[in-house]
Image (cartoon, grey):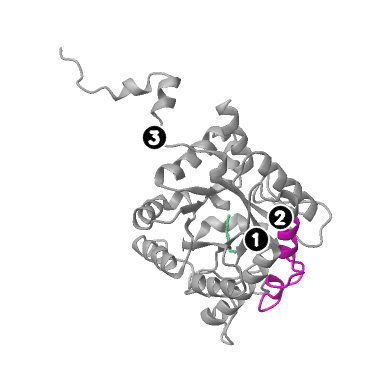
Amino acid sequence: MSFPAHRPRRLRQSAPVRRLMAETHLVPSQLVLPMFVREGIDSPQPITSMPGQSQHTLDSLRRAAVEAAEAGVGGVMLFGVPAVRDAIGSGADDPAGILNVATTAVREEVGDALVVQTDLCLDEFTDHGHCGVLTPAGAVDNDRTLERYAAMGVAQARAGAQLLGLSGMMDGQVAAVRDALDAEGFSDTIILAYSAKYAGAFYGPFREAVDSQLTGDRRTYQMDPPNAREGVREAMLDVDEGADIVMVKPGLPYLDVLADVRANVDVPVWAYQVSGEYSMVEAAAEKGWLDRRATILDSLMAFRRAGADAILSYWATEAAGWIRESLR
Ligand code: PBG
């Protein structure tokens, strides 16, 4: 009998050995917590499609931001749910609009303990629910939308956002917002481009979270799921337009695109573990079919392994707590 020449199991023999051999690490500062703030409510409203998540009041939002900071989370990404909407999403660039007011409040509360970020898109603010303004025929008007994004970006920077998440998938949006920011003296404001954002079913639970008014779909602007090469192209175009960070979204179903993008750009690459990914795990855990904590940590590590520098996750604060616990 001959002995095996190679024994990969040697490096898996015990917890200390495995720890020393780990190729990939996940630390709390690599996590960003998305949060929803809703105008005109006086207590947080649970989001039934996302068990454990709520639409926040300004007060509960401040508290959740402090909790995230205390857990060591790297940033919070804010989404606004306005009380009133219109065709052009006027609430988006109104300094008194809910997202801008909330941004200032969170900035006041946490200071520089984490990076305060805002979603830059019109869908929460329009009465038709699309990410842009519409032509008379009802199509999403790319270039008129860019003017709205530019105004929204400046309003968000003015409100105190340090990083803007451009999630609308309009062509030229990064350049348009960069120009407007620079012209107003906000050259330090960071642009995160949701470069390879795919249309599809995984955003389902998010619709309730933002009280979405959308009928129909976003398939004329978000990407088509069969296309991986095109995702790399979108990321490269955004880098060319001045994006500081590019993102792939959804997360786990698109790790192939994430790895491809990582190999083709030299800026940070982020991933968004979206609402559908969150709710699937919560539902299975509730049924006792999955070990909740272990599954969440496995999923977050998968993003790191595929090349993500940071991950937007609704579990950010909780996972940061677990990571710190495991390092003690
Ligand atoms: C658009 C936006 C969406 C999400 C983040 N930004 C909705 C969409 O594109 O339909 C979805 C995030 C999630 O599902 O968790 N403002």
| Three-letter amino acid code of the residue under disc 2 | Arg
Q: Residue at x 50, y 41 (%)?
A: 300
The segment highlighted magenta reads 81-107
Picture quarter containing residue 105? bottom right
Q: CA distance from mark 2 to mark 1?
A: 8 Å
From the image, tell me which residue sits under label 1: 161
Mark found first going from the N terminus, 3 or 2: 3
* 23 within the magenta span: no
Label 1 Cα neighbours within 10 Å, binned few <14 / some 14-19 / many ≥20: many
Task: Report x, y in % for residue 137.
Answer: 56, 86
| Three-letter amino acid code of the residue under disc 3 | Glu
| Three-letter amino acid code of the residue under disc 1 | Ala
Q: Residue at x 39, y 62 (%)?
A: 231
Task: Indicate which label's residue lies in the foreground, 3 or 2.
Answer: 2
From the image, tell me which residue sits under label 3: 23
Tell which of 107 and 145 is nearer to you.
Answer: 107
Task: Report x, y in % for residue 58.
Answer: 78, 55
From the image, tell me which residue sits under label 2: 107
Q: Quadrant of ligand 1?
A: bottom right
Mark found first going from the N terminus, 1 or 3: 3
* 100 within the magenta span: yes
Q: Is residue 245 left or right of residue 65?
A: left
Compared to residue 124, the image places residue 247 above or below, namely: above
Label 2 Cα neighbours within 10 Å, binned few <14 / some 14-19 / many ≥20: many
For label 1, the SS is loop
Quadrant location, the C terminus:
top right
Q: CA distance from mark 3 to mark 2?
A: 35 Å
